[in-house]
Image (tube, rainbow, N blue to C red):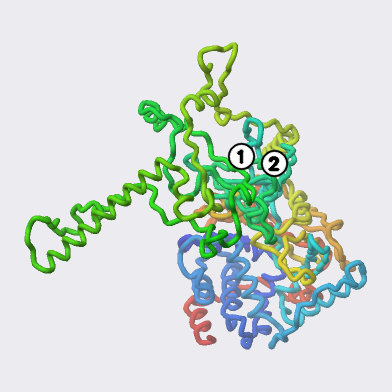
Amino acid sequence: MVGQTGLNNLGNTCYMNSALQCIRSVEELTKYFLANEHDEEMNYDNPLGHNGVIARAYGHLLKQIYKIPPPSTVAPRSFKDAVGRCAPQFSGWGQQDTQEFLGFLLDGLQEDLNRIKKKPYIPKPDSTDEMVNDQEAIRELAAQVWDIHKQRDDSIISDLFTGLYKSTLVCPECSKVSITFDPFTNLTLPLPIQNVWSRKVKFFPLNDAPVFLNVEIDKTASIKSLKDFISVRVGVPSERMIGAEEYRDKFFKIYEDDQQASGEITRDDIPAFFEVESQPTNTKSKTKKKAKSYLSSYDKEDIPRLNPRSNKESRIQSAKNSENISPPHFIMLTPEESDYFPGSMPGNPGLDINKAPNLPLRPQKDPKLRGGKSGGKKKVKGHKTYSKKGTKRWKQQQQQQQAARQSYKRNSYLDEDPEWGSKVDGGPLVRLGEGILVDWDPAAWDVVFGGQEAGGNARTTATGSPTFLNLDVLKDPQLEAKSQARKNRANRGISLDDCLKEFEKDEILSEDDKWYCPRCKEHRRAAKKFDLWKTPDILIVHLKRFSSSGTRRDKIDVTVDFPIEGLDITQRVLEKEDGKQEIYDLIAIDDHMGGLGGGHYTAFAKNFVDKEWYKFEDSFASPVKNPASMITSHAYLLFYRRRSDRVLGGTRFEDIVRRFDPADEEDDDDAAVNSQGSESR
């Protein structure tokens, strides 16, 4: 049967083969090339084109596939070589993304066959405040954008594949509304289950036992949004929360409100959020006013840990069991309590109290300071006579030994007096960013955390227990119901209509994708909404199965239930064209099986010659007995054709289709195509 032809895999080229099988199922485009119409519209002067190389190579490939008698398979070697010369990313033999390849192919054909010989520069118009609520003005703006598009890009690709969508942005601060229109050749639809970021976090209230909370927020949400989520469930204002990552019984980093939660908190992190007495003012903020500061009980630096036990046996046990160490936490200090003044201290204006004092915390371990061997030099002995050079070295060693003794005395004094650092340089007891280490009395530790009776008298004194161990999980029935509903939907799959709803849903821009508000003169996390304004005759739907967040990339393998016939989007299209239905029928599917690092691409396509479905897996082509079996979790690209009684693409295509005759074509040599491309370039 004509059209039932496979494509040889030249080496990891299944991504190319599947896309080619889908795109050739577009009847008008294929007959356009078979009728040699592309020769009449070749644009050799377009600096954005490829001098006709892509269009000629694609036309040659189609003639090989549709020749009589039909071949069972074709090796698209000349086409692959032509693509590799024009797009180096596809020149090798590594696996590529079929959607990216399809985008290049359509763009290459668009520029090679562009009827506009010299593109004019026309700035893209934007809405004004006056036209936001004027529907007629919005229609005029859309018509203007479409006219600009046709003045720059007018080809068979734009005739068949290009639509227009409306984008609305709203500033969260000043409510400025911006409406723009943009053309598209493939409609990327998000899957509604991909935007949820789920984690379990610790919450430490001021005067109660800590608990675990299950969190579910948008993947692009900020740390501030995470605090707001916790705030609703614990009744503590998010302004009085500080978040940090615990690591080895100290804080590894402190979260900032504008950071993306899913990027900052990775899978193995231990995120903890703390209620503090009042809103800290020395966090990252736009205001310069500073009334209070927050301090960690452990600094980020590798400072020595003071064990709550004092005897040797307890210290050894504690070293083996980190549960004896209470978790790090925050305290609040007023400027008076911390003796904190911005920039300098009274009586010592040159002292920067934000900078830690340059004082040693422990005896130096450098063998040079102990008079030991270093760098292979022999130790000089004082009772012997040496040359002038040796005498100089002996004096240096004496100075180093003296410095070592003084360093040891200073560190011994530091161990005995915890306020030594403050006394030496006249600075405050605690500086911004420093931590406080608490050395517990063993008896006091047992009373607070021992979990047993103090003094052996249960009737008079009871001991506390380490509430930071074995935390309870805070019950959240609403969240549990949402999680269960999402699991049920994942089990039964989602529909293409669900994806269209997700596409039209308002979203808040992420921190990495802020919009510049022309009224505020600042970048804002605006609310953004997409709508379909004008639809193309051939609608390519890209299911966004691959997502990235921070350093992680994921693939969503959920089944999307899509209609094979009768996709009705009438209610979703804002501007309908006279005489055109907004109902589509499926003509091809591009499937991806496997994970992020590789996988395999196959295709289903409806042959416009015999109106039957076929499965294409590289060189193999086989009929599909049950079209419903094509609906799987592998569907990646869907190709829909507008339902119409007439030929699509306009009246000029009626003559092309009428003249089309899949007659015998000479089997051109691959080298001829390559040489034509080289000569043209």
Marked residue nearer the N-terminal end (2 or 1) = 1
Residue 493 placement (x, y as % from top left): 69, 42
Residue 187: image quadrant is bottom right
Q: Does the residue at mark 2 contact the one at mark 1 (Cβ under 8 Å)?
A: yes
Residue 259: image quadrant is bottom right
Please name the amino acid that badge 2 sits on: Ile
Which residue is the site of mark 2? 230
Residue 646 placement (x, y as % from top left): 82, 67
Query: Badge 2 local density, few (<14 within 10 Å), some, or many (20+)?
Result: many
> Could you tell me which residue is drawn at 25 percent across and 57 percent down?
400
Q: Determine the secondary structure under disc 1.
A: strand
Foreground residue among 493 and 307: 307
Instruction: Count all numbered tags in the image, as a single digit.
Output: 2
> Could you tell me which residue is drawn at 64 percent across and 61 percent down?
512
Q: Is residue 262 left or right of residue 306?
A: right
Q: Determine the secondary structure under disc 2.
A: helix
Which residue is the site of mark 1? 201
| Residue 193 appears anywhere in the view | no
Q: Is residue 629 above or below residue 471?
A: below
Foreground residue among 143 and 267: 267
